[in-house]
Image (cartoon, rainbow, N blue to C red):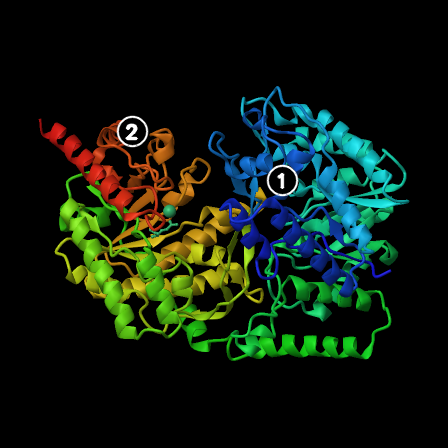
Amino acid sequence: MQKNYVIGFPRIGEKRELKKVLEKYWAKQSDFGDVKYVASQLKKRHWNYQKEAKIEFISSNDFSYYDNMLDTSILLGAIPKRFENLKNEELYFAMARGNETCVAMEMTKWFNTNYHYIVPEISKESTFKLNSEKVIEEYKEAHELGIKTKINLTGAITYLGLSKSVDNSDVFLHINKVVEVYKELLEEISKLDDEVIVQFDEPLFVKDLDSKVLSLIKPVYDALASVTPNIKIVVTTYFEHSNEATKILVNTPIWALGLDFIYGNKNFDAIELIKNSNKVLIAGVIDGRNIWKSNFQDKIQLLNKISKIVDKENIIVGTSCSLLHVPFTLSYEDNLDKEIKSWLAFANEKLKELSLVSKQFFDFKLNLDEVSIIRKNSEDNNQRKISSKIHNLKIQEEIKNLKVWERVDKFQDRIKVQREFFNYDFLTTTTIGSFPQTPEIRENRKNYKANLISKEEYEAEIKKYIDDCVAFQEEIGLDVLVHGEPERNDMVEYFGEMLDGFAFTQNAWVQSYGSRCVKPPLIYGDVNRENPMTVEWIKYAQSKTSKVMKGMLTGPVTILNWSFVRDDLPRSEVTKQIAYAICKEVDDLQKHGIKMIQVDEAAFKEGYPLRIENIKEYENWAVDNFKLSVSSAKVDTQIHTHMCYSEFNDIIKTIEAMDADVISIETARSGNRLLRIFKEVAYKQEIGPGIYDIHSPRVPSVEEMVKQIKALIEVLPKEQLWINPDCGLKTRKWNEVKQSLKNMVEAVNIIKKGEVK
Ligand code: GLN
Ligand code: ZN
């Protein structure tokens, strides 16, 4: 008995094998048999890795061709009507991605991670019917390899709670039906073996739940845990504490509770109850969301603290959540700095950590190899604390002595000066920054990175792009121009590569949705900007036009939210260092004559905490750091920001507090409905509500855009409005962009002429 437990394991493959075969299959270059073959190889490999690492509780049904929530919809037979004529893989991938006749189901972020799940669609008429094949087959597949797994399922309450009702009916109307299907499934599972463990994931329990949802917990788990005596039920929560649910679950016949002690420190407040009820506690102490090597001593200390409350024999040591949210393995990181690499642990390395931490905690006998790994762990962690790579005293000192944390001038004063200076009348036209990333631009970047072309050749190509981009914008008569961002691969990586304190990996991919993976940078040390990052390019672009050139930067909160962040400093402090770096860039830009600067905060909303009790604190430091990042801007430097969403109702006051002169947002798909909130709160600053949707290749007509602009003017005075697309244009084709922007400018001209009359 190892007494260790992995909530779930990544499935995309250490070399993204699943991604590759799926994309081939979708492109009709291979058949579904190939996908199945790769999947079975991956499952086998992943089970074996866990077995080799001596993990006792290994999952089945954590694998998925696309997404576990989608799998759950299939399992429960919750198939939206429009797909009813489809079967098997056609059905599955049509639900995920749409097909010629059916639109895909919606996708949204899984709690506060960057993973996205397929949102179940529920209506009053929804029916449910068990389809147990995948669950049962996967268990048997592992069994044949000699591995007895626990079975992972999405909890009934989380499943319904995260679904969307297409007819506004109450999603929980169906809770009894879902429980019935699960009971039937448990009956089937009980025949698989003498004893089977079933894990129900209920991350919804970490949110602030109303009493109605809380009242479902007891009946649901009373029912599920009494189906048959040979099934042991585990309920796992993660990403935060779940004290309200814990209090209820201890009074149900479940066997164990899995709690997150990394992101849910407050779980301590309710574990006394676990002791009293004699439940097993799966103590999530190995971080499933970040990539730093565990400090064994700290982990043992944490476990000791837990075991002061819960009896040691009732503790199992676990991961804080599924390892899905970290990259697979460090094995392929040959280019990473050796020292930095010694501070990291990805999913595969975390298995070994988990196993060793549980061995130490339970005083199992260690072999010599293990003793030396433990010694090395302590050395690496001590060395990390004092490494000169991490600590930049100069920058720490500068920040400590900072006097100015926000712009000196008030918006009312700034905007007067700016209006006079820029001399725009109203409905000023601009874009969000990027223009199409062409194959040539990508090729150019790749060749330069591979040392196949010289710096001069690389830069000449970028300049050519900027020339064309500026010429085009002038030709169609946009008011405020941009350089097009041809030198950037990504809005975070570009800046990270030029800042101290960031590292980049070769293979640290994390699944974002379906076959799509992202490779977030690692922020390992104090962030410092030694040299300007964007000034040369923006200056060059400005030299090509007498119109205003808008500089483009990524904001501190977005850089933070899209990176793996060091765990030895509070996130707010890390953000402060990034903000300070951006602040210097803003200053350099304005010193070089750039009078309009956009600081993108695409991921501002993503960082919101899951619990209401933590929101104020996040908002305070996120806003403060945004303000710091533009604090160097002079009264006549106009600061823009951009956010890729439109639902501002709950955070409008925070958005206003960011105090940007102009904000551009995504409202294209909602007409003027979402803009009304700005009017309701008497929002002062200027706004560019995206007037067309850049996420589709469709070119909107002039008439359509005229209509859209008219709808906007109904809500807000035209002097307060800017006209722009709803996001950057980098994913579009030039021919679409050219026509759309031409139409946009023409639409504004039509409205303006109407005004003159
Ligand atoms: N300036 C960036 C661009 O135009 C903004 C991207 C974003 O909001 N996601 O691409
Ligand atoms: Zn955007």
At label 1, counting other C-alpha atoms closer than 10 Å, the crowd grade (few under 14, some 14-19, many 20 or more) is many
Q: Does residue 100 appear in the picture of this structure?
A: yes
User: Quick one: label 2 or label 1, which is nearer the N terminus?
Assistant: 1
- Residue 229 location in percent, x, y? 90, 38
Q: Is residue 597 left or right of residue 209?
A: left
Task: Name which residue lies at 74% across and 34% down.
Answer: 217
Tell which of 590 and 521 is nearer to you: 521
Outermost residue toward the left in this view: 757
245 relative position to 361: left or right: left
Rendered view: 207 above or below 588: above
Camera-near label (2 vs 1) is 1
Tell me where residue 3 sits by quadrant: bottom right
From the viewer's perspective, tell me whether residue 250 is left or right of residue 399: right
Q: In which quarter of the image is the N terminus?
A: bottom right
Could you tell me residue 343's position as x and y percent?
Answer: 60, 72
Q: Which image quadrant: the C terminus?
A: top left
Q: Which residue does the numbered mark 1 point to in the structure image?
A: 69
Tag of residue 715: 2
Q: Quadrant of residue 170?
A: top right
Task: Kindly state the secondary structure of the residue where label 1 is placed.
Answer: helix
Going by the numbered disc 2, the residue's amino acid type is Val
Place of residue 437 in the rendered image (x, y in percent of width and height, measured from the top left):
33, 55
